């Protein structure tokens, strides 16, 4: 069975959709906007928006999460901390202690509870069973799961591969999990292709001179 593609479907300012895979669950939260330079791109305007993000994230199976206003505010706080940490890491700066504290405090809570279900819906374990999330799938548990992913990323072997897209005007952040470790663009569909087009145009203009 083919695994579903990971990543998010974003839209360029021109309205063209493209797939962006930041390589980690915690970094998928960042393009929901609102932080730092991007208040106009805010996606998490109400609790239901966080539940929609969770269903579209790389979490499998897609969780159905009940979110409160307080949990939505906590999600925005965590997102802001992760934005700053990721950008600091990408540019060789030590992440700020206050941001690390937010991540650690969020990760300390209980995460989303996984469980096994039989084909007929009964709980249990063994061959032929499916994976699901328990009924206590709250916004707080979702955020704890995201924060624990951040702990694994920033404290793991790929921390030095957290990067900001090399394209001018694009500030999307990703972790390069490729074997060569030479990823430069948020998406080849978007920034990578635009770079190739500009490079080709520049070569042609150079040949015509």
Image: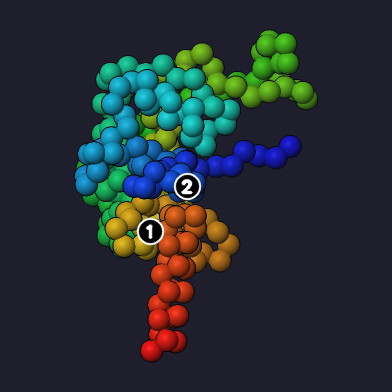
- In the image, is residue 106 above or below residue 155? above
Q: Specify the color scheme.
A: rainbow
- Secondary structure under tag 1 reads loop
Residue shown at 34% from the left, 47% from the top: 13
Q: Which image quarter: residue 121?
A: top right
> Measured from the top left, where is residue 32 in percent x and y?
34, 37
Q: Mark 1 or 2, which is nearer the eye?
A: 2
In this rendering, would 188 be left or right of 35?
right
- In the image, is residue 170 above or below residue 152? below
Badge 1, how many Cα within 10 Å: few under 14, some, many 20+? Answer: many
- To which residue does mark 2 refer? 18
Residue shown at 21% from the left, 45% from the top: 36
Q: Nearer the viewer, residue 53 or 15?
A: 15
> Measured from the top left, where is residue 118 in percent x and y?
71, 16
- Secondary structure under tag 2 reads strand
In this rendering, would 202 be left or right of 41?
right
Q: Tell me the number on the disc at residue 165.
A: 1
Separation of marks 1 and 2 at Cα, in angstroms: 15 Å
Q: Nearer the viewer, residue 15 or 63?
A: 15
């Amino acid at each position: 069975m083919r695994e579903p593609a990971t990543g998010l479907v974003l839209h360029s300012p021109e309205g063209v959709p493209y797939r962006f895979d930041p390589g980690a669950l915690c970094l998928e939260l960042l393009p929901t906007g609102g932080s730092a330079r991007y208040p106009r791109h805010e996606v998490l305007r109400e609790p239901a928006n966080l539940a929609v993000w969770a269903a579209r994230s790389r979490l499998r199976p897609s969780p159905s999460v009940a979110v409160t206003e307080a949990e939505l505010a906590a999600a925005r706080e965590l997102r802001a901390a992760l934005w700053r940490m990721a950008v600091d890491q990408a540019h060789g700066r030590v992440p700020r202690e206050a941001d690390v504290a937010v991540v650690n405090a969020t990760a300390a809570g209980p995460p989303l509870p996984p469980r096994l279900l039989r084909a007929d819906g009964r709980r249990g374990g063994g061959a032929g069973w499916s994976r699901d999330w328990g009924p206590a799938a709250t916004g707080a548990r979702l955020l704890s799961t995201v924060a624990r992913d951040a702990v694994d990323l920033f404290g793991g072997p790929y921390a030095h591969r957290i990067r900001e897209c090399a394209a001018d005007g694009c500030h999307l952040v990703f972790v390069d999990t490729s074997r060569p470790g030479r990823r430069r663009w948020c998406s080849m569909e978007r920034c990578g292709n635009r770079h190739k087009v500009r490079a080709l145009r520049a070569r042609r203009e150079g040949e015509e001179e």
